[in-house]
Image (tube, rainbow, N blue to C red):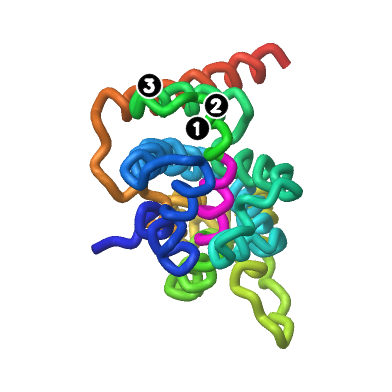
């Protein structure tokens, strides 16, 4: 069975994350499960959307490796501390992308579950923090499981050889730095280089390629709810395209 966001959440906080969420927001376990599971498709689409190119993926990896997010995954109370709400809102931005998307997702989750929007909006940053902590916990394992040399070779064509790693090598640091450099542009190969070897048609690295099933919701979603979640992100993409055209 593939390991996905639903598995990540149920394993969080020694397996007690769902119970902790239910207690914190005054919900039954059944209602807490319904709300969290209704949120997961949005987190899945948001993660894939917000890491869809090398530069964006590099930024996400930097957030994972510098944010000390694992505490939300491991500590039962960390996600519910009022002083950390700002951090959770930042994390929510990493996962969903904007406040407008977050509000639209909250409204849709209310429609899908019948749980009041104010409760859903309070829960959303906490659930995001727990998931981000889980991704930070799992990411090094996921990255180390990749055929790293093949991965780098596929995207580094035409770039200078990277310097040798520091003694304390961190695979997320290496991948993040590499992808950031790649995303900012590289020298085009000369005609001689193109003629000498086949052109690599591999598309740029994405979060979905790197993290695989970890970015999937991992559960069956009601079709109407899934369509509504997709429509939220499609609307956001259209708005961004319009802004770029105006600029």
The residue indicated by pointer 1 is 120
The reply to whether the C-beta atoms of the residues labelled 1 and 2 are less than 8 Å apart is yes
Left/right of residue 65 with respect to residue 16 in the rendered view: right
Q: Residues within 10 Å of mark 3 (few under 14, many from 20)?
A: some
Measure the alpha-carbon separation of dots 1 and 2. 5 Å
Q: Quadrant of the C terminus?
A: top right
Left/right of residue 246 with respect to residue 42 in the rendered view: right
Q: Percent position (x, y) of residue 90?
A: 68, 43
Name the residue located 48 percent from the left edge and 28 percent from the top edge: 105
Name the one closer to the observer, 23 or 119: 23
Is residue 131 in the magenta section? yes
Q: Which mark is residue 118?
A: 2
Numbered disc 1: secondary structure: helix
Magenta highlight range: 125-134
Residue 68's quadrant in the figure?
bottom right
Q: Earlier in the sequence, mark 3 or mark 2?
A: 3
Q: Quadrant of the N terminus?
A: bottom left
Measure the alpha-carbon separation of dots 3 and 1. 11 Å
Depth-wise, is mark 3 or mark 2 nearer the camera?
A: 2
Is residue 116 in the magenta section? no
The residue indicated by pointer 3 is 111
Measure the alpha-carbon separation of dots 3 and 2. 13 Å
Q: Residues within 10 Å of mark 1 (few under 14, many from 20)?
A: many
């Amino acid at each position: 069975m593939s390991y996905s966001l639903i598995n990540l959440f149920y394993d969080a906080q020694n397996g007690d994350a769902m119970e902790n969420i239910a207690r914190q927001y005054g919900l039954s376990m059944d209602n807490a499960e319904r709300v969290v599971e209704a949120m997961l498709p949005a987190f899945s689409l948001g993660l894939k959307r917000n890491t869809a190119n090398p530069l964006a993926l590099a930024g996400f990896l930097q957030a994972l490796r510098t944010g000390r997010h694992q505490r939300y995954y491991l500590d039962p109370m960390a996600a519910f501390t009022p002083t950390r709400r700002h951090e959770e809102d930042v994390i929510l931005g990493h996962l969903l992308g904007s406040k407008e998307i977050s509000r639209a997702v909250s409204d849709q989750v209310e429609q899908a579950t019948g749980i009041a929007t104010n409760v859903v909006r309070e829960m959303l940053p906490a659930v995001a923090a727990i998931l981000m902590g889980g991704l930070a916990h799992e990411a090094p394992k996921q990255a180390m499981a990749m055929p790293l040399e093949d991965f780098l070779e596929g995207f580094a064509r035409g770039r200078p050889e990277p310097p040798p790693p520091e003694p304390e090598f961190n695979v997320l640091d290496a991948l993040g730095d590499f992808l950031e450099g790649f995303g900012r542009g590289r020298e085009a190969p000369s005609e001689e280089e193109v003629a000498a070897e086949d052109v690599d048609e591999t598309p740029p690295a994405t979060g979905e390629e790197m993290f695989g099933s970890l970015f999937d919701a991992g559960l069956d979603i009601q079709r109407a709810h899934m369509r509504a979640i997709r429509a939220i992100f499609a609307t956001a993409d259209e708005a961004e395209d319009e802004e770029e055209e105006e600029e």
